[in-house]
Image: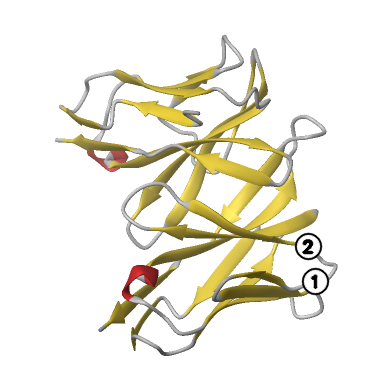
Amino acid sequence: EDKVVQSPLSLVVHEGDTVTLNCSYEVTNFRSLLWYKQEKKAPTFLFMLTSSGIEKKSGRLSSILDKKELSSILNITATQTGDSAIYLCAGVKQGKVGAGSYQLTFGKGTKLSVIP
Amino acid sequence: NAGVTQTPKFRVLKTGQSMTLLCAQDMNHEYMYWYRQDPGMGLRLIHYSVGEGTTAKGEVPDGYNVSRLKKQNFLLGLESAAPSQTSVYFCASSYPGRYTFGSGTRLTVV
C-alpha cells in the first residue's frame, strides 16, 4: 500500500522564521511528488519534483527531492502571516487504468501557523 | 478561465437521502478525480476517470458512484447518504503530473 508521511503535523513559528517541512513517500511506480498549499478552500499547486534531484524555487519557497531517502523537504524563508496554511505533499504514481492516468497519494498535511 | 467548478458548495442531507455533486472543467483534461478530505486524514481518492465513458475505483469508493458522460463533467453520486460521508469533497482534473482542484463541496449528513 502506498504511503506518504508528513512531519511535523503542525508547527507554530514567528514571522521572519525559516521553516522546513518534511515529506517521505513509499509509492509504487513513482513518477513525481507534488507540494500544495491549502488555505480555506482548494489546494493550490506549489511544486512538482522528480527523481532528477533538481531544486525548485519560487520566491521564499524552495523544495527538493532526495530519491535515495525517498523524501522531500519544503523550505520557507522569512515567513509571513500569509504563509499560514496546510501544506500537503502527494506522491504521483502511474494509474492502473489508462496509460496517462496518474493517481495521487496524499500525506495528512502540515498545518503551519505564522504569528506576528 | 473558470478551471474546475464544483456545485453545490454546501449541502446538508438527511441520512438515507441521495444527491449528486457536479464537477465541470473547461481545460479539456482527459483525467478527472473525486477526493474526500477529513480532519487528520488528508485527501483520499474516491473514484477517477481517464476519459469520457470510463471510470475506476480509488481508495475509498464504497457508498459512491460516478459517471463521466461528457468529457468536461464528472458526477459523484451518493445513493443513500450516511453520517460517515460527512466530509469536504474535492474534484480535480489533470494533465500528466499536475492537478487542478475545484473549490470543494462541504457536505454534512445528519
Can residue B85 be seen here?
A: yes
Residue underneath mark 1: A54
Along the line of sight, which residue is nearer the eye, A75 or A97? A75
Q: Residue at x 70, y 74 (%)?
A: A64
State whether residue A1 appears in this view.
Answer: no
**Residue at the front extreme, as displayed:** A59
Q: Which image quadrant is residue B11 in?
A: top left
Helix or strand or loop: what does disc 1 sit on? loop
| Amino acid at circle 2 | Thr
Q: Chain of mark 2?
A: A
Query: Which residue type carries mark 1?
Result: Ile
Q: For the point 27% across and 28% down, which residue is it?
A: B81
Q: Nearer the viewer, residue B5 or A59?
A: A59
- As displayed, is residue B23 above or below residue B34? above
**Label 1 with label 2: CB-CB less than 8 Å:** yes
Residue A58 coordinates in the image, percent (x, y): 61, 68
Side of B51 relative to B91 (left or right): right
- In the rendered image, residue B42, in percent from the top left (x then y), is placed at 44, 57
What kind of element bears circle 2?
Answer: loop
In this rendering, is residue A40 above or below B101? below
Seen at 82% across and 33% down, the residue is A99
* Residue drawn at point x = 80 percent, y = 53 percent: A29
How far apart marks 1 and 2 lie (CA) works out to 8 Å
Image x and y of residue A6, in percent? 52, 73
Left-right relation of B67 to A62: left
Would you say B92 lies left or right of B77 here? right
Quadrant in which the C terminus of chain B appears: top left
The dot on residue A50 is 2
Q: Is residue A27 above or below residue B20?
A: below
Q: Position of residue B96 (x, y in %)?
A: 74, 41
